[in-house]
Amino acid sequence: MSPGAIDPWWLAALALASYGCRAGGFWLMRFIAITPRLEVALRAAPLAVMIGVVTPAALHGGSAEIGGLVVAALAMRVFGNDLVATVAGVVAVALLRYAAA
């Protein structure tokens, strides 16, 4: 297997672990009372994850990544939808990388 190839067994194991964490989280949350403070924390979690993913790309990326961030920010401003902004940013990075190649 070449160094850049993805082993399907590892991919399946990671997908199973991801599903297990998510399902386990849903199961465990049945036993926890949702207080206003906890609700605020849970609502902030997706933004924290997105910042954790985007920040390294912004700091260490090139012009394609910066362009993708700008497109994602504009899409979020126009559409107000996280998913639309994310897809727009990813498509912008792909197109900018393709144009630069």
Image: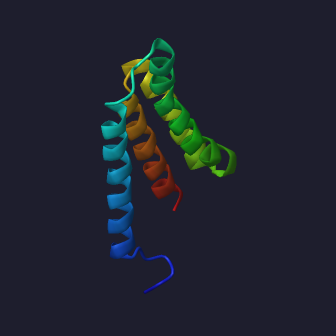
Q: Position of residue 42 (x, y in %)?
A: 46, 26
- The residue sitting at 49% across, 76% down in the picture is 4
- The residue sitting at 57% across, 36% down in the picture is 51
Decide which of 27, 48 is in the foreground and name it.
27
Please indicate whether residue 21 sits to the left or right of residue 37 in the image: left
Decide which of 34, 90 is in the foreground and name it.
34
Q: Position of residue 72 (x, y in %)?
A: 47, 33
Please indicate whether residue 60 sits to the left or right of residue 39 in the image: right
In this rendering, the answer to whether 90 lies above or below 3 is above
- The residue sitting at 48% across, 21% down in the picture is 38
Q: Quadrant of residue 70?
A: top right
Q: How is the image coloured?
A: rainbow
Quadrant location, the N terminus: bottom left
Q: Position of residue 97 (x, y in %)?
A: 50, 55
In this rendering, the answer to whether 48 lies above or below 1 is above
- The residue sitting at 34% across, 59% down in the picture is 15
